[in-house]
Amino acid sequence: MAMSGGSDDGEPMMDMNMTPLIDVLLVLLIMFIITIPVATHAVNIDLPSPTNNPDTPDVDPIKNKIVLTPDGEILWNAEAISQGELVGNLQQSLTFAVEPELQFEPEANASYDLSAKVLNIIKASGVTKFGFVGNEKYRAFGKE
């Protein structure tokens, strides 16, 4: 322990040794930092697992395509719609005897915030046939 270089007159030392207190606080701080979970911003979507024997129906199934533009527009089969209309279209597509496949394709400079909102709307609607399309365009990221 560190001793003070003050007078040695036999009286008790009135200064508190702060070193052990600071050591304990630093250890607690490190423990809190280690135990805090990493914040993740994810939209969990249950995607189908790939199979070796894909079903190939004779009839071309109905497909709905959502495209997000850099201007903040939502296109449903190439027609601009609002978020409210998107909810209505998704609910209407669930009423068909065979649920149509929903394809999601944000353009390169589309807003991430809008993409997250649209994905949350799709997840909340209960759509089960969902897929991301157009990802092959971004295979060579940053190259023309």
Image: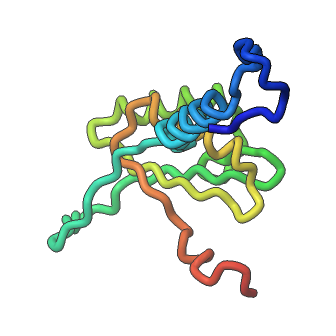
- Number of labelled discs? 0
The part of the image, by quadrant, that contains residue 128 is: top left
Residue furthest left in the image: 53
The part of the image, by quadrant, that contains residue 121 is: top right
* Direction from residue 94 to residue 79 in the image, left or right: right
Q: Residue shown at 79%/55% (left/top)?
A: 70
Question: Please, is residue 139 above or below residue 38 in the view?
Answer: below
Q: Residue shown at 63%/29% (left/top)?
A: 85
Instruction: State the scheme by which the image is colored.
Output: rainbow
Residue furthest bottom in the image: 144
The part of the image, by quadrant, that contains residue 114 is: top right
Q: Nearer the viewer, residue 70 or 35?
A: 35
Is residue 67 in sight in this rendering?
yes
Q: Nearer the viewer, residue 121 or 34?
A: 34
Q: Quadrant of the N terminus?
A: top right
Q: Quadrant of the C terminus?
A: bottom right
Give percent across and percent down for residue 109.
Answer: 77, 61
Q: Nearer the viewer, residue 63 or 2?
A: 2
Q: Residue shown at 84%/25% (left/top)?
A: 7
Q: Residue shown at 66%/79% (left/top)?
A: 141
Question: Please, is residue 32 above or below residue 114 in the view?
Answer: above
Give percent across and percent down for residue 47.
Answer: 34, 51
Is residue 122 in sight in this rendering?
no
Give percent across and percent down for residue 138.
Answer: 62, 75
* Direction from residue 34 to residue 68 in the image, left or right: right
Give percent across and percent down for residue 113.
Answer: 70, 42
